[in-house]
Image (cartoon, rainbow, N blue to C red):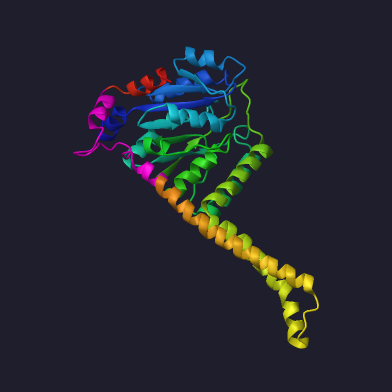
Amino acid sequence: MNEAGVAVRALRIAVLLPCYNEEAAIAQTIAGFRASLPDALIFVYDNNSSDRTREIAAAAGAIVRSERMQGKGHVVRRMFADVEADVYVMADGDATYDAAAAPDLVRRLIDERLDMVVGARRSEIEAAYRRGHRLGNRVLTSILARLFGRTFSDILSGYRVFSRRFVKSFPALSRGFETETEISVHALELAMPVGEVVTTYGARPDGSESKLSTYRDGWRIMRTILHLFRIERPVLFYGSIGLGLAVLAIVLAVPLAITFAETGLVPRFPTAILVTGLMILASLFFFCGLILDTVVRGRREVRRLAYLSFPAPGAEPGPGEGGGEGRASSASNPGRDAIGAHDGA
């Protein structure tokens, strides 16, 4: 086995599978990741399923936990808080993602010292990845790219591999399927080293139904992008509103200025008062953006420091750094800390 393969095997790898009514697919999903990552611990987080998802997952050998707050975002928050590992592989429990690609995603994360690798979906099966969903994904991805700069080709993919420092620095504030968008923006805002690998995307097994609502979830994702844009880019967000108000005020003021230049009179006092109010509002929006930008910069520095408090993927602590003995012990017994954390949860 090459050096990269040895490094991967020495790491604690956790497979995280959020589930809601996936009894038809969860066993196949677990078997796929068990075959591709035999040393990994597989966690299934059930989100109030009304079928036999929990029983089937436990019978398949997964560690089963529950999250009562409905929504994928709540499940992701719980998984990231509970599980202790060096590398996290997150996928859906519907057997649509290619589990055989997981070792390649993990290897790239380790070899290139990345913090996230996205499994970009590629499918020739219309039922697996409908044209409407592809179009919506492209539109939302392009919007995210315009607002936040560099981005990914598939921001809505649920197949991702994370480093420990990504997971433990991610606040996970979303409630539903918009959590993938929040994850992407978190990586972009902290300028994390990330990668993307094209993976196949298959159809659900018979008896398994999608929980996605094209229009409802699309609107929620769009709303999340705008919300994150307001929070992370306050100068641009509030400055754009201020600029619009200032332009409107100038357009209304031009006729008044011409009339005043010709006659020395201002006959339309309501318009003049409106122009004054619009310019005051424009100034308030502009300075609000500047003040909030200072606040956001401070928050970003705190998040960056929290992120830097963890070592890079596959890195060993140097001389004098804390945690060396604990990491060596964990590497010799993969998954021990993860099991202990959950048994005590």
Percent x, y of residue 292 = 52, 55
Percent x, y of residue 88 = 41, 31
Q: Is residue 265 left or right of residue 187?
A: right
Q: Residue at x 58, y 56 (%)?
A: 237
Q: Is residue 17 above or below residue 124?
A: above
User: In the rendered image, is residue 131 in sight?
Assistant: no
| 144 or 48, nearer to the observer | 48
Residues in magenta, as a range: 303-332
Extreme left residue here? Answer: 319
| 229 or 25, nearer to the observer | 229
Number of numbered discs visible in the structure rendering: 0
The quadrant where residue 13 appears: top left
Percent x, y of residue 80 = 45, 31
Magenta-drawn stretch contains 254: no
The quadrant where residue 167 appears: top left
Q: Residue at x 68, y 66 (%)?
A: 278
Percent x, y of residue 27 = 51, 18
**Quadrant, the C terminus:** top left
Q: Is residue 144 left or right of residue 316?
A: right
Extreme bottom residue here? Answer: 262
| 146 or 123, nearer to the observer | 146
Q: Is residue 126 left or right of residue 257?
A: left
Q: Residue at x 32, y 40 (%)?
A: 312
Magenta-drawn stretch contains 321: yes
**Quadrant, the N terminus:** top left
User: In the rendered image, is residue 42 in sight?
Assistant: yes
